[in-house]
Image (cartoon, rainbow, N blue to C red):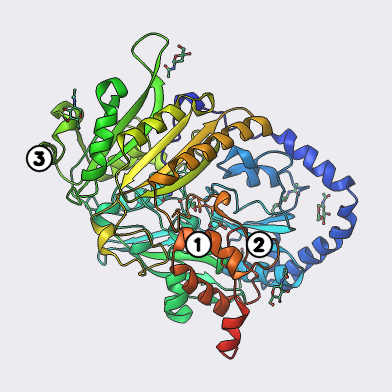
Amino acid sequence: MELMNTSTSRINMKIQSTAGLSFVLVLLFSSSWAASAQNHEDFLQCLSLHSQNSTSISQVIYTPNNSSYLPILQFSIQNLRFTSSDTPKPTVIVTPSHESQISTVIKCSRAHGMQIRVRSGGHDYEGLSYVSELPFVVLDMINFKSITVDTETRTAWVQSGSTMGELYYRIAEKSKVLGFPAGFCPTVGVGGHFSGGGYGVMLRKYGLAADNVIDARLVNVNGEILDRKSMGEDLFWAIRGGGGASFGVILEWKIKLVPVPETVTVFAVDKTLEQNATNLVHKWQSVASKFPEDLIIRIIITRVNSTRDGEQTIQASFNSLFLGGRDRLLSLMQESFPELGLAKEDCTEMSWIESVLYFAEFPRGESLEVLLDRIPLVRHYFKAKSDYVKEPISKNGLEGIWKMFYEDEAEAAYMILSPYGGKMDEISEYAIPFPHRAGNLYKIQHLVYWEEEGEVAAERHISWIRRLYSYMAPYVSKFPRAAYINYRDLDVGMNNQGNTSYAQASIWGFKYFKNNFNRLVKVKTMVDPGNFFRNEQSIPPVLLWRKKKGD
Ligand SMILES: Cc1cc2nc3c(=O)[nH]c(=O)nc-3n(C[C@H](O)[C@H](O)[C@H](O)COP(=O)(O)OP(=O)(O)OC[C@H]3O[C@@H](n4cnc5c(N)ncnc54)[C@H](O)[C@@H]3O)c2cc1C
Ligand SMILES: *[C@@H]1O[C@H](CO)[C@@H](O)[C@H](O)[C@H]1NC(C)=O
Ligand SMILES: *[C@@H]1O[C@H](CO)[C@@H](O)[C@H](O)[C@H]1NC(C)=O
Ligand SMILES: *[C@@H]1O[C@H](CO)[C@@H](O)[C@H](O)[C@H]1NC(C)=O
Ligand SMILES: *[C@@H]1O[C@H](CO)[C@@H](O)[C@H](O)[C@H]1NC(C)=O
Ligand SMILES: *[C@@H]1O[C@H](CO)[C@@H](O)[C@H](O)[C@H]1NC(C)=O
Ligand SMILES: *[C@@H]1O[C@H](CO)[C@@H](O)[C@H](O)[C@H]1NC(C)=O
């Protein structure tokens, strides 16, 4: 999601500690507390007994009666839907500072029937990194944030609790001509982002973040620390796009940095319906995935006030990064998309790192240090969905979308169209678990934000986006209706709380991974046959495959 700074939904993110207080009271007085307290105590005792370093682990454990518990829990929550007092909370939060502490948490969790939710940047759309219906521990990777950039070999080791902003900052600190192709939002964590794919404005030139991962270290279900060599190519394949949470706790990634020119050019050209937006969007669909790979133009659609008093209209914002200078961009646009009427004044030349700030919606001239700030400027209540488009949508089809954007619930709704083609067409559908490659013109992210607290407002907006999603069905990919795992959407299917059948999981599994789902199931069966690492959309193991392998 690239769009947080919308004036319509600016929300103060100050943490409400009253919500947490009522949670503690409920916990203390509910009858189930007594029963679970024993497990909870045993679990805590296990942590200190089995720790090689019990002094240090006791310093990174937060129970609900600790005054830092709620601030730490709330700190990286992105979606306000999961900050309410009735959102299930973890029994314990552990913020490991040593790798050995992670092994200890895994072993004690298994011994005492606790679930683990691993959190890096906390940007999961459905809160899966910090919400569970079963008793659980949040393993928050916040202290794993070292980044080592090596410009000689053009590689970097990045610990999973680092944010994208920190990574971009550390690269730019060392080189003006190296970058990395990943997401827009500086507070996204690399732990979740890379393990789900990770795309940004350089995807037409260099593919996804996960396409550029060359090694990784993780802790497996037995508490062992593995790297690419010792985990083997199947598991290394699975964690680059298959979602990390099914396979272990990722400690760090080794990535390949990519060349960027000293000068890049950006533009944003807004067109309303009165300014021919429908025709331009229609035309864009058939040209955007064919541009040279140095050029990406995405479109952000939303409802805005019209220049006529009191009226509203739909706006399509054509927003672009070009890996080169302004003059070459202008002649290229003249050749391939003259209808947009791009003018010299629309274009701004800057360094690649400045373009990172631009796409993160910081004002021009902002200090690069803002990239190191882990607290986002704004947080929202939101719900999002994704779609892939293989054939241009007709003008009639587009007009039907505009109609839905005039509805009340769509006051802060967006549709973000991101073109594919270029490098995305060249990478095999099986190279990593992320399967959405050749044949896709563009991806859509559907988004709706709101500001009002509570179930009623949530229900209204969520039902609007579900209706939009139904409306889109004839125009987007089918069998399966493809979706992007990093835009997590539990509407596309869910597991049971315990073990889930292959058939049930394949409902959502094929949407995210197509046929790669089968290989993910095989890897899961190999590395976590007891299904310890699980959540609402984790890959299930299948007993049959395990037996066949003579396990
Ligand atoms: C404001 C915003 C902007 C975004 N922009 C983009 C974008 O430009 N491009 C894009 O592709 N996506 C984008 N996303 C989506 C983002 O890529 C995903 O939400 C991603 O999973 C977030 O990673 P995280 O570490 O912050 O999340 P978390 O919530 O910490 O984790 C997400 C999932 O990964 C698991 N996980 C996290 N860390 C680990 C680990 N170390 N080991 C194993 N499993 C782990 C969690 O358990 C959870 O299942 C955006 C999201 C938001 C909220
Ligand atoms: C134990 O903790 C201390 C202090 O945090 C640390 O310096 C030391 O390396 C740790 N030892 C082990 C074996 O993890
Ligand atoms: C809260 O937990 C932290 C980390 O374990 C610890 O350092 C701190 O002393 C605790 N605070 C209180 C008030 O118990
Ligand atoms: C906080 O909770 C933990 C775990 O239940 C318990 O061991 C500890 O004594 C409690 N501390 C206080 C100050 O209540
Ligand atoms: C509107 O856009 C279409 C297609 O892009 C173009 O052919 C047409 O000339 C444009 N009309 C106006 C009035 O700009
Ligand atoms: C749009 O217009 C409404 C009422 O006319 C006004 O309240 C609102 O602030 C305007 N929004 C923007 C973004 O200008
Ligand atoms: C899931 O299946 C595994 C393997 O058969 C079994 O060990 C485990 O107890 C099951 N878990 C649940 C919650 O049913």
**Which of the 4 image quarters holds residue 43?**
bottom right
For the C terminus, the quadrant is bottom right
What number of labels is visible? 3
Q: Does the Cβ of the disc 3 residue fall within 8 Å of ligand 5?
A: no
Q: Is disc 3 in contact with disc 2, using a CB cutoff of under 8 Å?
A: no
Instruction: Name the spot of residue 420 as percent of width and height, x first.
Output: 29, 51
Q: Residue shown at 67%/31% (left/top)?
A: 456
Q: Which residue is mark 2?
A: 116
Which class describes the residues within 10 Å of circle 2: few (<14), some (14-19), or many (20+)? many
Cα distance in 3D space between marks 3 and 2 = 54 Å
Q: Earlier in the sequence, mark 2 or mark 1?
A: 2
Instruction: Identify residue type, mark 2.
Output: Ile
Q: Which residue is mark 3?
A: 335
Quick check: 191 left or right of 495?
left
Instruction: Name the spot of residue 399 as percent of width and height, x first.
Output: 36, 30
Instruction: Name the spot of residue 17 as percent of width and height, x first.
Output: 71, 35
Viewer-proximal residue among 274 and 484: 274
Residue 296 in sight here:
no
Q: Residue shown at 54%/37% (left/top)?
A: 382
Q: Which marked residue is nearer to the observer: mark 3 or mark 2?
A: 3
Which class describes the residues within 10 Å of circle 1: few (<14), some (14-19), or many (20+)? many
Picture layout, residue 348 above or below residue 237? above
Q: Does the Cβ of the disc 1 residue fall within 8 Å of ligand 1?
A: yes
Looking at the rendered structure, the secondary structure element under dot 1 is loop
Image quadrant, ligand 5: top left
Looking at the rendered structure, the secondary structure element under dot 3 is helix
Q: Which residue is mark 1?
A: 243
Quick check: 217 left or right of 284?
right
Picture layout, residue 199 above or below residue 99? above
Q: Earlier in the sequence, mark 3 or mark 1?
A: 1
Instruction: Identify residue type, mark 1.
Output: Gly
Cα distance in 3D space between marks 2 and 1 = 15 Å
